[in-house]
Image (cartoon, grey):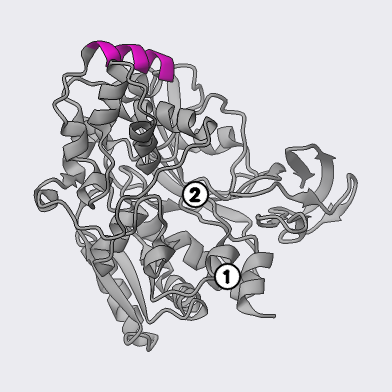
Amino acid sequence: MELLEMIKDAGIIGAGGAGFPTHVKLAAKADYILLNGAECEPLLRVDQQLMEFYPDDVIRGFEMAGRLVEADQAIIGIKGKHKDVIAILEERIKALGVSDYVKIGILPDMYPAGDEQVLVYETTGRIVPETGIPINVGCVVCNVETALNIYKAAQGQPVIEKYITLAGDIPHHITVKVPVGTPVLDVLKLSGIEDFEQYAVIAGGPMMGPLLTDLNGYITKKDKGFIILPKDHPLIVKKSCSVESAKRVNRAACEQCRMCTDLCPRYLLGHNMQPHKLMRISSYTIDENIGQTTALLCCQCNLCEYFSCPAGLHPRLNNLRFRGEVTEKKLRYERKTETYQTRPSREYSKVPSKRLVARLGLKEYDCKAPMSDVDLHVKNVHIALGQCVGAPCEPIVAVGDHVEAGQMIGQIPEGKLGAPIHASISGNVLSITDQYIEIGG
């Protein structure tokens, strides 16, 4: 079986949170393939440990992906502060005999170094065009865990496990490997907290991760970590703001200082993303469709809202509102140029990770979350039919069937974008709904 087909059958998707089917991404041809090892979201600790503990598998999987897209160069993007991990990678790259192909690309310790367009520029010097994606400039980007899963797929192993970091105001900061479909609450309790009545949970990193409105969900292939904080923590209060509330506050208080624009990572790459102008349009109820379409350039990194604005306003939510409105109107952003240059101020406008952590009120929680072997004794899993960008899977098992761990239980609908799903434990199919396949061990 060809590698691309093995990757497809293994159900590999972007493990960094986006969830795009990897077999589709790797069907392209590129000049560069980039490994996103920045892990720029504060407190998350998965990728650095995967590169530390499984360097050979990560490097091999990354190299395989690079050969597949016929890339001339494979570059591992990693922050220079991770000196120990870099030393391990350099030694293993040499030992594996791929030093002529796989290189280390040192990234600054800034947010958002892991934004794929920022990563492309920092490692290759190329600028992805507005509304574009890395392949537009000959680059393909994959996540560290995705590369690990590619190596496993080549060994016949599908994606049935997920690495998760637990961080925040908790007794135990840890990173664990759990079966896909494990109850989220079971994983959260590994933090040392049993009662979450006074806590809120962020799904993912503190910058881009949303608040969980229901803790009774199940782990998917896209999950990366959970940040657990008291409900009265300033970050939780900020994330609890609705689009409508933000609209009222923004209209009353924006002073057009343009700090949100001056520190915007996409603006600094030369794009026309100017949040302060969208705030102006909102404040004065200006009916300017062309101006509103610039909201489509926003990467939702939240830097404008959680760091830049001195008044604590909500530029990101404002961008999100306009994005929804122009999408509903079926408007598109029209590029004025195909040639981009970084803003002269970019070198002096990068936001250091430590300053960001301090601004978020997370400094005391910015610590190691060591990889821990934990046996949850998972008896029942709920495997979501829709875990990636594209169409939900169609079940290929029936209630009462016995399945083995690793067995495919859901396939991609004919002619649709998606990725298959597999049983993460051995057991019987207990129920099938339009959302989940439940398996009892």
Residue 172 lies in what quarter of the image? top left
Q: Where is residue 413 in the image (x, y as percent from the top left)?
A: 76, 54
Q: Is residue 191 magenta?
A: no
Point out the stretch of residues depicted in magenta.
243-252
Earlier-in-chain disc, 1 versus 2: 2
Image point (66%, 57%), residue name: 419
Q: Is 409 displayed left or right of 268 in the figure?
A: right
Q: Dot 2: few (<14), some (14–19), or many (≥20) neighbours within 10 Å?
A: few
Q: Where is residue 208 in the image (x, y as percent from the top left)?
A: 38, 38
Q: Where is residue 316 in the image (x, y as percent from the top left)?
A: 33, 30
The answer to whether residue 169 shows anywhere in this view is: no
Q: Is 126 displayed left or right of 177 in the figure?
A: left
* Marks 1, 2: nearer the viewer: 2
Q: In the picture shown, does residue 81 fall above or below 298? A: below
Q: In the picture shown, does residue 412 fall above or below 188? A: below
> In the rendered image, which residue does mark 1 sit on?
152
Give the total of numbered labels: 2
Q: Is 400 displayed left or right of 314 in the figure?
A: right
Image point (43%, 21%), residue name: 199
Q: Is 393 displayed left or right of 367 in the figure?
A: right
Q: In the picture shown, does residue 254 fall above or below 51? A: above
Q: Is residue 249 magenta?
A: yes
Quadrant containing the N terminus is: bottom right
Front residue (pair 88, 340): 340
Q: Which amino acid does the dot numbered 1 rest on?
A: Lys
Q: Which amino acid does the dot numbered 2 rest on?
A: Ala
SS at mark 2 in the image: loop
Front residue (pair 329, 42): 329
